[in-house]
Image (tube, rainbow, N blue to C red):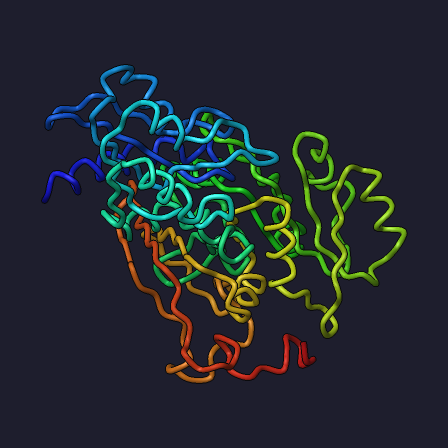
Amino acid sequence: MTDDRRHMWRALELARRGRPYVAPNPMCGAVIVKDGKLVAEACHEAFGELHAEAAALKVAGSGARGSTLYVTLEPCCEHYEGKKTPPCVPALIEAGIRRVVVAVEDPHQHVRGKGLKLLREAGVEVEVGVCKEEARELNAAYFSHVERGRPLVTAKWAMTLDGKIATRTGDARWITSDQARNEVHYDRGCTGAIIVGIGTVLIDDPELTARGEVGRQPVRVVVDTDLRLPLESKLVRTADQGPVFVYAAEDSSPERQSRLEEAGVYLILLQRHGKTHLRWMEICTDLGERGVNSAIIEGGGSLVASAFQERTVDRVKIFVAPKVFGGEDAKSPVEGPGVPDVSRAVTFTKLHTRTLGPDIVIEGTVVYPTDDGPSPSGYWTGYGGDNP
């Protein structure tokens, strides 16, 4: 491994420390090296606080002059409305940084190569692309939000070895271990939104909060076309403690709309497609416009199936418990009409598997079939037989 890669790996490690707190900003780490020796290192610790480069410069002081900066994302360079901190490029130039090694360019409209250009014009040597893929992977949610205008969407579920998310009677507490559930809450604290369908709410009455001392509370989202969300549900009763978004059809009950809004729920009304369907692209676009750059779909099976159907899911995270439930009537994590043949299956790449206590965790990136038809069920006629 070259020195450049070694120092950039360290910057990436530092950047990960900010995961629970920096959104909607990207994670970023910075390492300052001079004559082969470490001068300073830092990360962007929380939204609104110093960027990694500025924090590292603060530690380095006069020792930054003539040094090399390794940074995981292109330094920012402009003031603009809503920006919380001063731009980093002028500070780097003033500090006398001799060389800047950048993992990946920032796609933000106020950066997008401008920071690199200004550094070069000031006589700073600039190199781009060291650990580029790792840096893009680190900030996949940020890149999704900036480049696609929508959050990075992960489908998450816990299941038994035989692929069941509940017994035939509906009992699902608990499938996985305490260690797995602790990680679920950590992930919730690091994500922008948790999404469930109305069926999950009616069965489980969840709060969808992140429990623990790490991270922030996510936006709690219910996809509820016909507005069946009970006023006595935990989500409605705790709407004053953290935002609850409900996506419903424009033609849902006006009386129900008024009562839920009076209870503090945020209603987002979308066009109905078929009898029961809302479009995932419209939901994700709306979340993106509200600054949400990552989301986790936690169920149920019909909702997850519809998200795969519309090619909305980007990642999966699956907790597998060493148990077998059996039962024809036991629920599966992905329901819907299913694929017509093996060639239409959703597959995965960049798979990572590890053990967590007694459980197995599988994470991967979704790969959809290459043809133009919807996935995974071919040219479907809609859930319940209606065209979308």
| In this picture, residue 272 sits left or right of residue 347 | right
Residue 234 visible in rendering: yes
Front-most of residues 265 and 100: 100
Q: In which quadrant of the rendered view does residue 214 lie?
A: top left
Residue 141 visible in rendering: no
Residue under the image location 31 percent in, 41 percent down: 120
Residue under the image location 70 percent in, 54 percent down: 247
Where, quadrant-wise, is the C terminus in this rendering?
bottom right
Where, quadrant-wise, is the N terminus in this rendering?
top left
| In this picture, residue 174 sits left or right of residue 116 | right
Q: Residue furthest right?
A: 255
Q: Position of residue 118 (x, y in %)?
A: 38, 40
Q: How many marks?
A: 0
Q: Position of residue 350 (x, y in %)?
A: 29, 59
Q: Is residue 131 above or below residue 179?
A: below
Residue under the image location 26 percent in, 28 percent down: 97
Q: Is residue 16 above or below residue 35?
A: below
Front-most of residues 170 and 262: 262
Q: In which quadrant of the rendered view does residue 347 lie?
A: bottom left
Front-most of residues 258 and 2: 2
Residue under the image location 35 percent in, 29 percent down: 53
Q: Is residue 378 above or below residue 197?
A: below
